[in-house]
Amino acid sequence: MAISFDEVAVGTELPARSFPVTRATLVRYAGASGDFNPIHWNEKFALEVGLPDVIAHGMFTMAEAVRVITDWVGDPGAVVEYGVRFTKPVPVPNDGVGAVIEVTGKVAALLDDRRVRVDLVATSGGQKVLGMSRAVVQLS
């Protein structure tokens, strides 16, 4: 069921989501994206360059966050613009549990042509990991 422009208002909250991230997740993402930077898989290297641990790929974090919108609207093609600022890394410990990215979203503005701007908040370990996370979504 598509979300209609007429059904939303500024302040409409999207269903929140939690996304678990493990070292295995990072390996799969590295293979899919071709991003084999050692900060995403080599703990010794990550620590040597000043990171708290191996960290999730920024583009992975960004992609998980936008899933809140694509799941809500039901069509990934409805996202016509999307951008973020990377504010903090997502450390992923090798403890069998990993990390969790928590994402909430809210309609922040009604735009022309049945579009809305949705603002997202993404946190991990109690820290905001994406800033200025915003998307423009075409609704029916």
Image (cartoon, grey):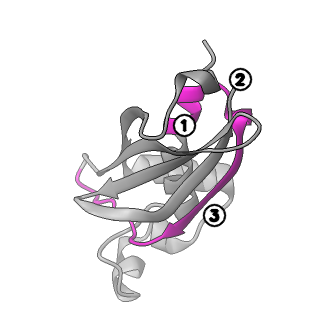
For mark 2, give the secondary structure. loop
Crowd class of label 3 (few under 14; some 14 to 19; many from 20; radius 10 Å): some
Amino acid at pointer 1: Ile
Q: Badge 1 local density, few (<14 within 10 Å), some, or many (20+)?
A: many
Circle 3 sits on which residue? 35
* Residue that badge 2 annotates: 140
Kindly give the residue lying farthest to the bottom in the view shown.
49
Query: Residue 25 appears at what percent x and percent y?
Result: 46, 47
Q: Mark 1 or mark 2: which comes first in sequence?
A: 1
- For residue 100, the mark is none
Q: Nearer the viewer, residue 48 or 118?
A: 118
Which mark is in front, 1 or 3? 1
Q: Quadrant of residue 80?
A: top right
Q: Which residue ends up furthest to the top in the rendered image?
A: 1
Q: Which residue is mark 1?
A: 69
| Residue 104 image position (x, y, % from top left) | 38, 43
